[in-house]
């Protein structure tokens, strides 16, 4: 089973960076990706993230995401080319020759450009976030989120969501096997597929809801109810954090220069 | 330490009380076993003793409950009580909240121990007691049932409370894992902790429990020492498949219904099955017995095509189970999984059974539904929402969903987990009657008692291999 968004123990450069440094980097990188309208700059960011992944030996995690990102990209391109028109028209999906509807659905420079922009932004966000999660111990994740003054309740919610992803994957597999044993045969076509999700989704949701009471009571028994803030672990910064933040500062400078020029 | 007098409790939105007129006292340093059939109020009593009923759940509480001389309702909620009492719930998976074992245990400590070195030494201490030091970096979902349970106990222990309450810590565990848990409880008692443990199985508690409360329908039915209450019960651990005192099985002359030759299966780099050979004959009632992780379930999944062999041959009836589509195989081999909740999704019992029938395009669904419902004694419940049934009823419904498809071979994966003795026996009688009708029954289990009592043949498995094949001879009585 491939694990989605789970911490992978290791001792690489990214693992050893302070979680606060990493979170700061993720926030600033995501912010820049939202602000920039430049495909070239976004391409540069993606390249930088890939470099970081290779340096910390996490490139396989990134490669695993590629098929998903391609599907996401194609979907975004389809939506934007169909809905956004502007600039030069490259061609029309319905050829000119056909009467009445001929020349409809033009594929334009503006539509394609926007689609690419969205795709690149999502790639930056997803990959940087993923790299942060897989290289950061969950307790350090909590520390870093606390350092940014996130409320404890939200941090716990986030942590619990991450923790239960693989459990849900396992449970879904178990349910699927149980239904297949009853001759369950997922339907074909979009509607068939959606309808045939019912025998899987309902037990999955019902079983998860059944767990919530125990989960809540466990948190109570461990004293989380009374906890308004978790004590901060001593935050440690090393030279490597300085270097990483310096590199980030260079990227920000490049960002400013790129957009002023 | 804990004193209850005439305590009764009714859950919100229900009519029947879950606890009736409970009067008990528990002293410091005692190890108390609470036992009784399903729905006797064991879990509710745990919740009451932990203060959860008063402070979290609401409902109607009458009578008196005090802890260390002070009424439990007067404590400042769970935030005060959790410094005195910790509880381990029966669903081990739901109470492991963090992403690694070590953090799970550390989670409750941050508010209690101020320095990191104190925390580390406490964590190491409880991991040592529960024998999970080697798991400290692992993620909870990747652990076995027994390991999860031990981590949950360690997390509760780390709180260093005087009282530890455990709700069915061994219900899904095999003999060795249960033995480990009971050994841990014994150690805790020796350290002076008060331990309250719920278990519907009595095995292993003789000489361990100081006193036993037996509940029935919300009342204390009997109480006393283990020897007073259960003089005849085998109170020590029994793992017959370690040293079987059984007759070797002699193969029949007839054509087998299932024939497995040199079956191997590997998950990633774990060899789950290795060189398994097995012949099962029509009309047999076979128990496949082994510990958790011995490969029993993996083997069962090969019989209806859910898993395919890496190498080796499987023939079911005259079908090649290695290549035949699952849709064909499930018509002949009905596999019922351990937990009925993994399959129940419909709005009514009737619709639940119809799902399988529609999938295979069965004739006369109405007739089959009413037939199987009377067979599993759920007649009259056609319109009920399946998840409102009791655990035993849900298990029988799960079985009836498979029975309605009329497979020749019925495979049950741990059919008695979570069921009390009465429900387990009811399930086994049903299987016996199906065997008499000509079905072949294969039961995967780690419960030696039911295997010995009901099966004709026991196949023992360990570490992905068949380690023994025995006939059960019952003489004139059966």
Image (cartoon, coloured by chain):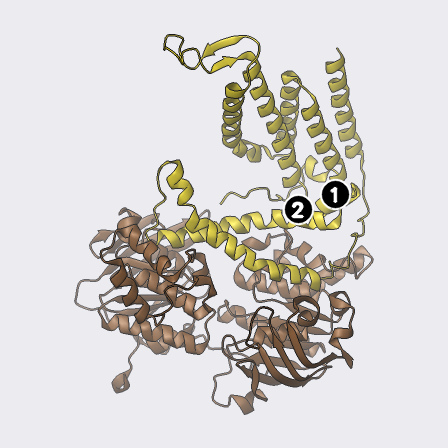
Q: Is residue B196 visible?
A: yes
| Residue at image point 61% right, 34% down | A57
Chain at numbered mark 1: A
Give residue B25's mark.
Answer: none
Mark 1, secondary structure of its residue: helix
Residue A42 appears left or right of B36: right
Q: Earlier in the sequence, mark 1 or mark 2?
A: 1
Dot 1 crowding, Cα within 10 Å, few <14, some 14–19, many 20+ = some
The chain coloured brown in the image:
B
The percent position of residue A55, horizontal first and vertical second, equals: 65, 30
- Residue linked to disc 1: A145
Q: Which residue is mark 2?
A: A158
- Say if mark 1 contacts mark 2, CB within 8 Å: yes
State the image coordinates of residue B343 (x, y, percent, origin top left).
42, 57
In this rendering, the answer to whether A176 lies above or below B154 is above
Report the chain holding disc 2: A
- Chain rendered yellow: A
Circle 2 packing at 10 Å, graded few (<14), some (14-19), many (20+), is: few
Q: Residue at position x 45%, y 12% from top?
A: A92
Quadrant for the C terminus of chain B, please. Answer: bottom left
- Residue A192 point in image, percent of width and height: 37, 40
């Amino acid at each position: 089973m491939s694990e989605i968004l789970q911490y992978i123990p290791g001792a690489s450069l990214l693992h050893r960076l302070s979680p606060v440094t990493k979170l700061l980097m993720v926030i600033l990188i995501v912010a820049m990706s939202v602000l920039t309208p430049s495909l070239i700059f976004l391409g540069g960011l993606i390249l930088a993230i890939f470099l970081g992944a290779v340096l910390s030996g996490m490139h396989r995690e990134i490669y695993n995401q590629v098929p998903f990102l391609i599907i996401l990209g194609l979907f975004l391109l389809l939506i934007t080319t169909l809905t956004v028109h502007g600039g030069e028209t490259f061609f029309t999906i319905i050829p000119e020759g056909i009467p009445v509807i001929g020349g409809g659905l033009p594929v334009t420079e503006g539509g394609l450009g926007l689609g690419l922009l969205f795709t690149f932004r999502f790639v930056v966000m997803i990959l940087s976030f993923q790299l942060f999660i897989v290289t950061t111990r969950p307790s350090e994740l909590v520390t870093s989120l606390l350092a940014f003054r996130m409320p404890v309740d939200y941090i716990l919610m986030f942590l619990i969501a991450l923790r239960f992803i693989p459990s849900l994957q396992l449970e879904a597999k178990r349910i699927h096997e149980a239904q297949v044993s009853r001759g369950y045969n997922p339907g074909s076509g979009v509607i068939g597929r959606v309808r045939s999700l019912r025998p899987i989704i309902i037990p999955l949701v019902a079983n998860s809801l059944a767990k919530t009471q125990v989960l809540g009571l466990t948190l109570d028994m461990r004293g989380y109810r009374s906890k308004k803030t978790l004590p901060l672990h001593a935050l440690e910064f090393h030279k490597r954090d300085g270097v990483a933040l310096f590199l980030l500062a260079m990227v920000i400078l490049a960002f400013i220069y790129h957009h002023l020029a | 330490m804990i004193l209850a007098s005439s305590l009764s409790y009714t859950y919100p939105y229900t009519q029947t009380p879950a606890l009736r007129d409970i009067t008990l006292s528990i002293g410091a340093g005692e190890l108390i076993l609470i036992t009784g059939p399903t729905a006797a109020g064991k879990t509710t009593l745990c919740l009451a003793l932990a203060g959860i009923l008063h402070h979290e759940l609401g409902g109607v509480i009458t009578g008196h409950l005090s802890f260390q001389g002070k009424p439990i309702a007067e404590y400042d909620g769970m935030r005060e009580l959790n410094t005195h009492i910790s509880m381990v719930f029966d669903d081990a998976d739901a109470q492991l909240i963090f992403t690694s074992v070590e953090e799970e245990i550390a989670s409750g400590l941050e508010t209690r121990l101020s320095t990191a070195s104190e925390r580390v030494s406490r964590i190491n201490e409880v991991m040592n007691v529960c024998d999970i030091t080697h798991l400290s970096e692992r993620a909870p979902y990747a652990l076995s049932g027994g390991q999860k349970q031990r981590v949950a106990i360690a997390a509760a222990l780390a709180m260093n409370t005087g009282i530890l309450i455990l709700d069915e810590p061994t219900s899904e565990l095999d003999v060795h894992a249960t033995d480990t848990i009971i050994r841990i409880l014994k150690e805790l008692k020796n350290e002076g902790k008060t331990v309250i443990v719920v278990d519907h199985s009595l095995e292993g508690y003789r000489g361990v429990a100081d006193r036993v409360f037996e509940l029935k329908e919300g009342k204390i039915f009997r109480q006393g020492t283990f020897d007073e209450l259960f003089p005849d019960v085998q109170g020590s651990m029994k793992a017959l498949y370690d040293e079987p005192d059984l007759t070797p099985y002699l193969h029949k002359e007839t054509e087998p219904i299932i024939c497995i030759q040199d079956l191997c299966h590997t998950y990633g780099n774990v060899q789950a099955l290795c060189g398994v050979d097995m012949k099962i004959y029509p009309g047999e009632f076979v128990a496949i017995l082994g510990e958790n992780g011995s490969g029993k379930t993996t083997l069962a999944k090969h019989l209806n095509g859910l898993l395919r062999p890496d190498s080796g041959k499987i023939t079911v009836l005259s079908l090649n189970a290695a290549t035949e589509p699952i849709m064909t195989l499930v018509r002949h081999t009905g596999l019922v999984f351990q937990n009925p909740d993994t399959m129940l999704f419909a709005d009514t019992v009737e619709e639940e059974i119809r799902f399988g029938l529609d999938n295979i395009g069965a004739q006369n669904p109405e007739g089959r539904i009413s037939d199987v419902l009377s067979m599993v004694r759920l007649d009259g419940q056609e319109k009920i929402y399946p998840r409102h049934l009791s655990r035993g009823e849900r298990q029988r419904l799960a079985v009836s969903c498979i029975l309605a498809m009329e497979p020749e071979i019925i495979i049950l994966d741990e059919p008695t987990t979570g069921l009390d003795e009465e429900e387990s026996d009811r399930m086994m009688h049903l299987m016996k009657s199906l065997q008499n009708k000509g079905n072949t029954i294969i039961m995967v289990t780690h419960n030696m008692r039911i295997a010995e009592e009901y099966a004709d043949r026991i196949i023992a498995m360990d570490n992905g291999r068949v380690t023994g094949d025995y006939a059960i001879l019952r003489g004139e009585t059966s």
